[in-house]
Image (spheres, rainbow, N blue to C red):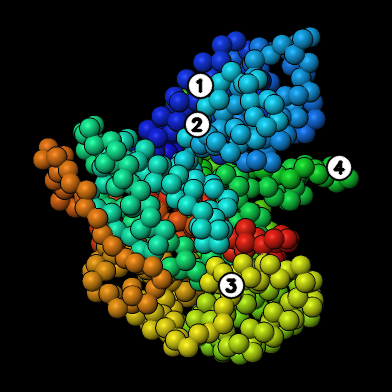
Amino acid sequence: MAAYLSYGRVNLNVLREAMRKELREFLDKCAGTKAIVWDEYLTGPFGLIAQYSLLKEHEVEKMFTLKAGRLPAADVKNVIFFVRPRLELMDIIAENVLSEDRARCPRDLHILFVPRRSLLCEQRLKDQGVLGSFIYREEYSLDLIPFDGDMLSMESETSFKECYLENDQTSLYHAAKGLMTLQALYGTVPQIIGKGECARHVANMMMRMKREFSGSQNSILPVFDTLLLLDRNVDLLTPLATQLTYEGLIDEIYGIQNTHVKLPPEKFAPKKQGEGGKELPTEPKKLQLNSAEELYAEIRDKNFNAVGPVLSKKAKVISAAFEERHHAKTVGEIKQFVSQLPHMQAARTSLANHTSIAELIKVITTSEAFRDNLTVEQEFIPGIDTDKVNSHIEDCIAQKDPLIKILRLVCLQSVCNNGLKQKVLDYYRREILQTYGYEYLLTLNNLEKAGLLKPQGSNRNNYPTIRKTLRLWVDEVNEQNPNDISYVYSGYAPLSVRLAQLLARPGWRSIEEVLKLLPGPHFEERQPLPMGLLKKRQQGENKVTLVFFLGGVTYAEIAALRFLSQMEDGGTEYVIATTKLINGTSWIKSLMDKPEAPPF
């Protein structure tokens, strides 16, 4: 059991256990000793569901990464390929299978497609003459993976590009399937509300799947009151802005992958007396970041400027707790101190780690480049000088700063101006292509297709209306003790989260006109429940809303939703689901045909 998954109103351990059960059943089907050959991308997501100990219990003796050439030698009865349905991976598997010496060392081969089997992939294996070599060809529905007590992700890295550039709805089908699994475990969601084309597709697929299973009535008391489906392209602005929460900045600078982050090792080397000349570690320091760690749960969603005071307060509390040992006189008191020791030592290690991370981040956030960048963002968002060429962007191009940094700023300017004047857009395009190379023409076309970088049409600029009506920019922000979600970007309130907030109170009818200005339809569906399952809410009990971001969500948006959940008079608690956890860099990178280094 992962205890941190059951901290919230919705016990996500139920989902994790269902996934583990399905995995165990498949492994037991392949009787005897096993070696798993992993598609490398899957090891992170699988690590959140099953540690090596679970695999070991089911006779998994060896694990390898999928690579071209020969399979490594292993004295096992079964070799199982865990792979995504990608054609290029099928070619590697075929090469592995053909190089097997079946006569000398016969091993049973199996393939597990994650999250779905694919006819195209099976046809590719057939063309290569290896399809018949596999005894079991099955699929494992790794749709929504529990990341934390209030957070689920599909970790589908290309979902935004597929939906908005390639018109491929595969990830939307997986989203609908994942939501049907959630309903099977947590009860039917009585109310579905959505905004955007993709949201409409997912709701339609859910209705169709429900009709197909109409024979079986769900008899579980619903845990969720509302499902809110939001398209990422309803709010293209938020991921482009630099996140200013502690967790958001860790992700912006170092990138959080499947709740883990790799950090520069020199900050974490143990300092021992007399070891001045000792060599520093060279391997990055890998830390897991989730709410199982008490201190991280407390500071992750705070504005970075509010983290320092919390850390220094914690340091005083911990050193005072260690001082207690001098006052322990009786055997009982000493025994009590010793029993608390493991918890205190864990707290001290946690504090040391987060103090080091905060110091690393502070070096970046106090740098001139970071502050200049932020100044430009905080001029664009309230609508200052968005209609002309920006001198800071010009300077950054002239200095050949990382291209992603340039693209984020130019796209932000475009979104905050509802498109750029043709001559401004042409100027930026020309400067970027001449400085970084004409191979980025495809990337610029992708950004235009996605609506991130576009010419201003004949329509008027609706952004000021949207900004004022939804209060997207707040001048006076209290970063230490916030009273509004705008603290996560030090002034900008994420449009997506503002929509969720207004849906809860007073309802979307109050912003009907603005909703029409945002892309895609908005809709509501009701799923009728049998009489015995209608929820009678206790006095003071909050509603539970599942917010599903189709196309990705940032940690700052998650922080803003958690802030709303904790508001005393909020009345709603939020659980967040998404196709992928993103930041501006990883998002733009997913649309690039030639990826670049991170911007900071």
Q: Earlier in the sequence, mark 4 or mark 2?
A: 2
| Amino acid type at mark 4 | Lys
Secondary element type, mark 1 = helix
- Residue 281 coordinates in the image, percent (x, y): 80, 43
- Residue 168 coordinates in the image, percent (x, y): 51, 53
Q: Earlier in the sequence, mark 2 or mark 3?
A: 2
- Residue 191 coordinates in the image, percent (x, y): 24, 53
Q: Which of the two discs, 1 and 4, sits closer to the camera?
A: 1
| Amino acid type at mark 3 | Glu
Identify the image quadrant of the C terminus: bottom right
**In whole angstroms, how far apart are the C-alphas of marks 2 and 3?**
36 Å
Q: Earlier in the sequence, mark 3 or mark 1?
A: 1
Using the image, tell me which numbered label, if any, was put on residue 3: none
Q: Nearer the viewer, residue 52 or 419?
A: 419
Q: Residue at x 76, y 24 (%)?
A: 98
Side of 540 relative to 318 (left or right): left
Residue highlighted by disc 1:
26
Residue highlighted by disc 3:
448
Residue highlighted by disc 4:
278
Q: Residue furthest left?
A: 531
Q: Which of the two discs, 3 and 1, sits closer to the camera?
A: 3
Residue highlighted by disc 2:
140
Side of 96 relative to 233 (left or right): right
